[in-house]
Amino acid sequence: MIDQAVELIRKSSYSIALTGAGISTPSGIPDFRSHESGLWNNADAMQVASLSGFRYNPLGFYTWIRPFADLIKNALPNPAHFALATLEDLGMLQAVITQNIDMLHVDAGNRNVYEVHGHLRQMTCINCFKEYDSEPILKKFFENKEIEVPRCPACGGALKPNVILFGEQLPMQVFIKAQQAVRHADLVLVAGSSLEVHPVADFPVQVRRQGGRVIIVNNERTVQDDIANVVIRGDVAEILPAIVDKLASE
Ligand code: NAD
């Protein structure tokens, strides 16, 4: 299977990667759907992580997200992220589209990254829409023992990290660029995504429909395994470096 994936990537002229939470679990950040992570086990998670939930009860959101954000703060890219960075350096990967908010693809060295579900670099006031760099605000947030809602220095409104919550539109400019990459793609390498979150989950279907190839690397079955040309079941932190090592040594 690895050899087949290598062959498809070698033959492609415009390949993209589509990544989900599973590419960052080897960096210590749990995905949402695996049962043991706990992030989704809280019955209210869907409500807490929604835009309306945030507006109604920002403290509930910050209480829920604090342990998750703490893991992201301390996480480093793992061999799967570095493999994709090497692939881009080799000229064999044109873009990474990620659903992750952890910024680890950029940290690993990928340059053409579309973070379609947002990121934690900035925060926006939900009242006056002023934007701020997150770093000093989150530093203070984590120093406080008591959980406090970060507030806008200008108007006192609650600050929301620039991550996309349920019920919120995707960042338009980034999403359009991601769509353009998908339109050009003759291969998509999906890594660590259940492919259950739309509209991003439509991308492999679109690549297939326009005659391109789909490779899925995931440790469990995904809903799109049937449309893939190659499915590799295993740990992304082992499989992606194995694929890229072969391509680099050719
Ligand atoms: P998901 O939780 O739906 O799916 C992750 C998939 O990766 C699962 O099928 C899981 O079995 C698989 N997986 C986990 N670890 C793996 C490994 N080491 N090797 C191979 N496969 C592995 O994630 P999703 O599809 O990205 O959707 C969840 C949503 O939650 C996204 O919208 C994302 O924004 C958000 N999220 C982000 C992060 C992050 O930024 N790191 C973490 C959790 C959730």
Image (cartoon, grey):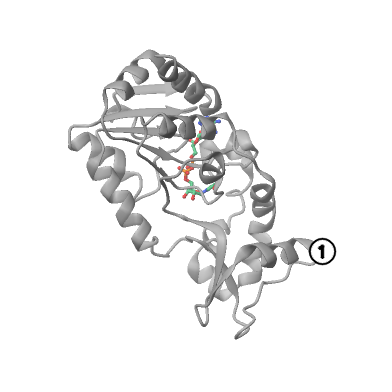
- Location of residue 160 (image quadrant): bottom right
Please determine whether, in this image, residue 82 is positioned above or below residue 54. above
Residue 32 x %, y %: 55, 45
Q: Does residue 211 appear in the picture of this structure?
A: yes
Q: Residue furthest bottom?
A: 155
Q: Residue at x 68, y 47 (%)?
A: 71
Q: Residue at x 28, y 50 (%)?
A: 179
Q: Is residue 104 left or right of residue 90?
A: right
Question: Is 22 or 153 nearer to us in this picture?
Answer: 153
Please determine whether, in this image, residue 166 is positioned above or below residue 21. below
Q: Residue at x 35, y 62 (%)?
A: 172
Q: Residue furthest left?
A: 210
Q: Is residue 83 left or right of residue 169?
A: right
What SS does tag 1 mark?
loop
Residue that label 1 marks: 145
Q: Amino acid at mark 1?
A: Lys
Residue 102 x %, y %: 56, 49
Question: Is 110 or 78 nearer to us in this picture?
Answer: 110
Badge 1: few (under 14), some or many (20 or more) residues near its Cα, within 10 Å?
A: few
Residue 231 x %, y %: 37, 23
Q: Residue furthest right?
A: 145
- Location of residue 62 (image quadrant): bottom right
